[in-house]
Image: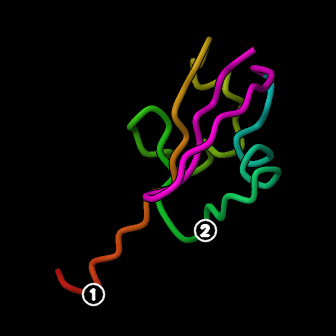
Amino acid sequence: MIKVTYGNNVTRADDIVEPATVIKDFCETHKIDYSVGSMHLNGAPLVHGEIYKTFADLGVTDSCFLLNVVKADNGVA
């Protein structure tokens, strides 16, 4: 079992899941809108296709942070 701390820039929550849980399925179950920000697993951004992998595929064995980070700079570069 894996303890996942998930959330966004403002909120955090925890859940316990199976290592075979697909990241996309986890996001949909926990109402994480992965289309509005950059998904990060343990601080590293998920690249194209990794959202369709399981936690085990991505090397998570006991706990992790899965965060959706929204860059809200109001268009300032």
- State how far apart marks 1 and 2 are (Cα): 18 Å
Residue type, label 1 = Gly
Tag of residue 43: none
Q: Residue furthest left?
A: 77
- Residue at the image point whose x is 58% and y is 19% from the top: 63
Residue under circle 2? 35
- Residue at the image point whose x is 72% and y is 51% from the top: 27
- Which secondary structure, mark 2? loop
Residue type, label 2 = Ser
- Which secondary structure, mark 1? loop
Q: Position of residue 12 (x, y in %)?
A: 55, 46
Vertical relation: 68 (above or below) 41:
below
Q: In the displayed structure, does residue 27 sit left or right of residue 60?
A: right
Please rate how many residues cluster around mark 1, counting C-alpha atoms within 10 Å: few if below 14, some from 14 to 19, many from 20: few
Q: How many numbered circles are shown?
A: 2
Q: In the displayed structure, does residue 3 sit left or right of residue 11?
A: right
Where is residue 32, by image quadrant?
Answer: bottom right
Please rate how many residues cluster around mark 2, counting C-alpha atoms within 10 Å: few if below 14, some from 14 to 19, many from 20: few
Q: Position of residue 16 (x, y in %)?
A: 75, 25
Q: Position of residue 4 (x, y in %)?
A: 63, 30
The one of 48 and 28 positioned closer to us in this rendering: 28
The one of 15 and 18 positioned closer to us in this rendering: 15
Residue under circle 1? 75
Where is residue 15, by image quadrant?
Answer: top right
- Contact check, label 1 and label 2, Cβ < 8 Å: no
- Residue at the image point whose x is 27% and y is 87% from the top: 75
Q: Which residues are magenta?
A: 1-19
Q: In the displayed structure, does residue 7 sit left or right of residue 23?
A: left
- Report if residue 14 lies within the magenta region: yes
- Report if residue 9 lies within the magenta region: yes
Sooner in the amino-acid sequence: mark 1 or mark 2:
2
Q: Position of residue 31 (x, y in %)?
A: 75, 59
